[in-house]
């Protein structure tokens, strides 16, 4: 398992310093770290769609790539995510 500090350093090294997502028990330590570090650069979203929307908005306004973290349970997904060619990717 990757350490939160190491992950943040890698992302920041690549100019990704804005974080949004849906925390769960697996991502709890990441969420705690981000909330303590800088609340202005971390937005907890209510659901996956909101997290992606917030991340897109951040990119459009700053041209900087955000880090969007999500919960994922395929059995609970109501639809499949497809690429531009119609291939199922999730």
Image (cartoon, helix red, strand yellow):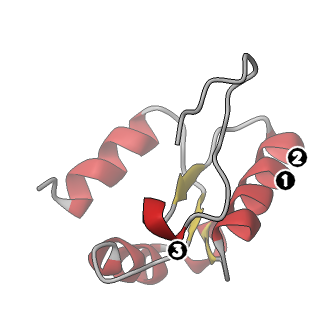
Q: Locate residue 72: give its quadrant.
A: bottom left
Residue at figure coordinates x 78%, y 43% from the top left: 59
Q: Residues within 10 Å of mark 2 (few under 14, many from 20)?
A: few
Residue assigned mark 2: 61
Residue at figure coordinates x 41%, y 77% from the top left: 31
Q: Position of residue 29 (x, y in %)?
A: 28, 77
Residue assigned mark 3: 38
Task: Provide the secondary structure element on which disc 3 rests.
Answer: loop
Q: Position of residue 47 (x, y in %)?
A: 66, 76
Residue assigned mark 1: 57
Task: Provide the secondary structure element on which disc 2 rests.
Answer: helix
Asked if the residues shown at circle 1 and circle 3 are in contact, with their CB atoms under 8 angstroms apart, the answer is no
Measure the C-alpha gap from mark 2 to mark 1. 6 Å
Residue at figure coordinates x 36%, y 83% from the top left: 32
Front of the two marks 3 and 2: 2
Q: Position of residue 71 (x, y in %)?
A: 46, 68
The N terminus is located in which quarter? bottom left
84 to the left or right of 79: right
Residue at figure coordinates x 80%, y 58% from the top left: 53
């Amino acid at each position: 398992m990757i350490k939160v500090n190491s992950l943040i350093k890698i992302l920041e090294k690549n100019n990704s310093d804005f974080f949004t997502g849906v925390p769960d028990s697996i991502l709890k330590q990441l969420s705690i770290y981000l909330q303590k570090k800088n609340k202005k650069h971390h937005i907890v979203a209510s659901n996956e769609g909101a997290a992606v929307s917030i991340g897109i908005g951040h990119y459009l306004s700053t041209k900087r790539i955000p880090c969007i973290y999500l919960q994922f349970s395929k059995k609970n997904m109501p639809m499949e995510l497809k690429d531009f060619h119609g291939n199922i990717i999730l």
